[in-house]
Amino acid sequence: MQRSTSFFIAGLALGVLLTTGAFSLYVRSVNLGGGGGNGALVLKLGHTLDANHPVHLGMLNMAERLAEKSGGTVELQVFPNAQLGTETENIEQLQRGALALSKVSTAPLEGFVPEMAIFSIPYVFRDSEHFWKVADGPIGKELLLAPESKGLRGICYYAAGSRSFYTISKPVLTPDDLIGQKIRTMRSKTSMDMVQAMGGAPTPIPWGELYTALQQKMVDGAENNPPSFYNSRHYEVAKHYSLDEHAMMPDILLASSTVWERLPPQVRQWVQEAADESSIFQRELWRKMSDEALREVEKQGVTIYRPEKAPFIESVAGMHRSYDGTPVGELMRRIAEVR
């Protein structure tokens, strides 16, 4: 009875919006809604990952959960493969209220919210369990809401595993092995500083151009998580994968603050619940797919190494100290205290 009542209330709220100029403005400015054949409110989610990626599958799970919770009154449409634009373009669309939701990596968010650099700093998190205690706790929730001044609202985190080095000519077993090697990084100052602190030469290259760069030896290696290493087929060129697990950068599901504020409270609750449940689903899926990716690249002739992490941690100690007295440094202190 309570569930039926909530569907009725949400439907009534949507009905009021549909019959007022407010919803007309909402549809025009947001380019959502009204697309469902049954009159459902349609929320569009754009991202750049392929349709087989575990994060995309997690968002499809969110769509299923949202449809179930709303009794079909709210529909989430997920557009992969940059159909609605690049990651940067999606963020700009969110800020304008032209898109409801998007998945982004934390790295490009550093330019909007400096505290997001915490995810790019190497060895801030002791392990995956520590990471999720932080992400699911007060600190994680603070960071999700930190971009609100930029017109963005974090909804949940999706697992993106640990990033490790893979190389063409020799394995990275200690930081000394990075000396003289050009390592592809994202266009993130923190990521570039990390490679430099370890002795390598950071070389920012767009992800889509990296296979060719490795093949032509424009770079000596790169760093990423196992599913990305496997799905990109970089294992065809780089046969050494060293699981130093230097950084844990999650993906974040972002909502447009403009869109979020215009949704009825019941719809917001359904969206948040569906997202939280999809995050749990996706974490387990990520673990399975990550293990499978490692097995598959080994079959393709890649040697997997598990080096001691202590020398890598020591190599970035100065980088950690450089944040002393800053908001990011305070975050690092608080994270270290999470048990």
Image (spheres, helix red, strand yellow):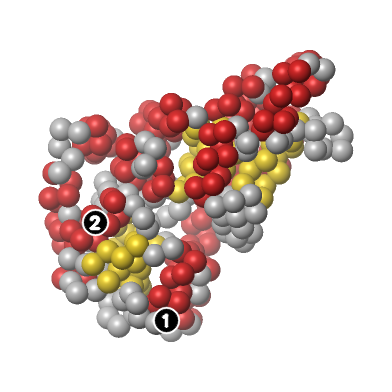
The residue at the point 27 percent across, 64 percent down is 202
Dot 1 crowding, Cα within 10 Å, few <14, some 14–19, many 20+: some
Whether 56 is drawn above or below 169: the answer is above
Residue 19 as seen in the image, left or right of residue 321: right
Dot 2 crowding, Cα within 10 Å, few <14, some 14–19, many 20+: many
The residue at the point 42 percent across, 55 percent down is 161
Please name the amino acid that badge 1 sits on. Gln
Circle 1 SS class: helix
First in residue order: circle 2 vs circle 1: 2
Q: Nearer the viewer, residue 135 or 130?
A: 135
Whether 24 is drawn above or below 162: the answer is above
Residue 17 locus on image (x, y percent)? 76, 19
Of marks 2 and 1, the one in the foreground:
1
Visible residue check, residue 299: yes
Residue 193 locus on image (x, y percent)? 23, 55
Visible residue check, residue 279: no
Residue 200 found in image quarter: bottom left
Which residue is tagged 1?
A: 215
Residue 71 as seen in the image, left or right of residue 283: right
Residue 125 locus on image (x, y percent)? 29, 46
Residue 68 as seen in the image, left or right of residue 222: right
Residue 283 locus on image (x, y percent)? 51, 49
Tag of residue 314: none
Please name the amino acid that badge 2 sits on. Met
Looking at the figure, which quarter contains the N terminus? top right
Rounded to the nearest angstrom, the CA distance separating label 2 from label 1 is: 24 Å
Whether 164 is drawn above or below 19: the answer is below
Which residue is tagged 2?
A: 194
Looking at the figure, which quarter contains the C terminus? top left
Circle 2 SS class: helix
Q: Nearer the viewer, residue 113 or 238?
A: 113
